Image (spheres, grey):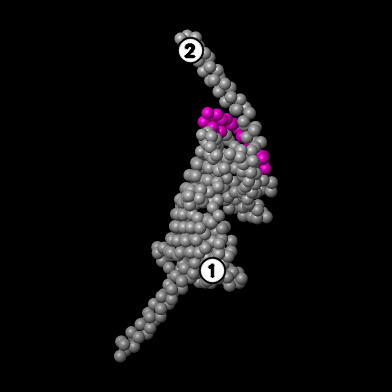
Amino acid sequence: MHWFRRPIVVIGVAAIALFVFTQTALGFLLRPALERQMRYIFRAPVHIDQAGANVLAGSIWMKDVRVKNSSGFKERDVLTVRRLSINLSILSLLTSKLVVSRIKLVEPVFYVEISKSGQMNLLYFSEQVARWSEKFLKKTRRLLRLITSYELEKFWIANGRVLLTDARQPKHRWEFRLTSFSLARLMYPPDPQEALPAALYVHAVVQSKEKGQVLVIGRFNPFADRTSFDMTASFKDLVLSDYEYFFPVFPLTFADGILQLKVKALCHENQADLDHQVRVEKLKFHSPLLSRKLKQQLVFGLPPTALAHFFNELRPVSEPFEFHFRVTGRLDDPEFDLISEVRKRIRQEIYDQVTAKMKSLTDGTQRMVEKALVEPVKHLG
């Protein structure tokens, strides 16, 4: 039996040595190769501190990845990642479907920047990735004609951050913490048997006077000919004064106000149905010192001074302002614009509530005046 055992031991030791050698060689060769490939994808300088692979598991990992920002922007980088790993399903290589089992980013930081000319750096990089993806799909189909479909089982971001700056308003800087972001079962081409294959989960925390939270859960099909999705979004404890930047034409400034918003969005083959529940607590505006032009500009169909007076003086601060509305329509209808319709409904809801309350207050005041005039007459009689 010794003559049989020795060759097995030799082969085993040789296999282990070959595996260790391969892993070590990959550690030296993989990093510059990955840097070149990522430079080709983003069309920007890329630096990777360390990289490696596990051949048996079909995985690649990178540490301390940095993608340099495009020219014309102040931030040094557009993306930094402490650790990035990609896992490929080895068994899928035996079939006609190429499956990436997981892409994971640990502690990434996305630097979203708007230049003085109004250009956003993220648009440039998204265009480059889109072009590369199109070329990659054509190339793999040409080289490996047996591959007929692609699937990403899970894309995961752990403890990420999004930093937003605008060179036109350098004093403003927003930070959103992505405690968790996951996208599961992204399939191309789409599965005709499953209407909503991809699942989305987003949980973000907004640092402010109140600890705001954003939660999005849903399913959708990004590659279908007709849009379909089922989404639920919740926005909690968002301080309105922190987001005045996103409403540049709004003539009033918030002195106080905390937004609570829930949206249930359904869409089946371009037929959309969105249900909104809006609640604003402690809403107050700064006393408006407006130019003649801004005084003539209506806010939700009302003069801005009247709107500020209503919330600052007439409405109790302890009473929340809330309303509910629903928007439906076909996304392929040229006369239906979803964003415009939502804005229109918000404007109408606020206008109706404010005017109704002011009318009731006016009627109540009128009755008090009439009663005050009648009482002395009765007394004299």
Numbered circle sitting on residue 216: none
Q: Nearer the viewer, residue 246 or 194?
A: 194
* Furthest-right residue in this view: 71
- Give the secondary structure at mark 1: loop
Residue at the disc numbered 2: 5
Mark 2 surroundings within 10 Å by alpha-carbon count, few (fewer than 14), some (14 through 19), many (20 or more): few
Q: Name the residue: 64% across, 43% down.
A: 138
Q: Amino acid at mark 1?
A: Val
Instruction: Kindly report the distance in space between the C-alpha atoms of the residues bearing marks 1 and 2.
Output: 87 Å
Residue 132 location in percent, x, y?
64, 44
Q: Position of residue 161 (x, y in %)?
A: 53, 45
Q: Amino acid at mark 2?
A: Arg
Viewer can see residue 272: yes
Q: Going 48% across and 12% down the picture, which residue do you hit?
A: 5
Magenta stretch, residue numbers: 39-61
Residue 55 is a magenta residue = yes
Residue 99 rendering spot, x and y as whole percentages: 53, 39
Q: Give the number of the mark in front: 1 or 2.
A: 2
Residue 37 vertical position relative to residue 73 in the rendered view, above or below: above
As displayed, is residue 90 above or below residue 214?
A: above
Determine whether, in the image, residue 220 is placed left or right of residue 49: left
Is residue 253 visible from the viewing direction of this image?
Answer: no
- The quarter of the image holding the C terminus is bottom left
Q: Position of residue 28 (x, y in %)?
A: 62, 27
Q: Quadrant of residue 76?
A: top right
Q: Which mark is residue 299?
A: 1
Q: Is residue 122 above or below residue 290?
A: above
Which of marks 2 and 1 precedes in the sequence?
Answer: 2
Q: Is residue 262 magenta?
A: no
Extreme-bottom residue of the structure: 381
**Foreground residue among 287 and 75:** 75
The residue lying toward the viewer, choosing from 291 and 266, is: 266
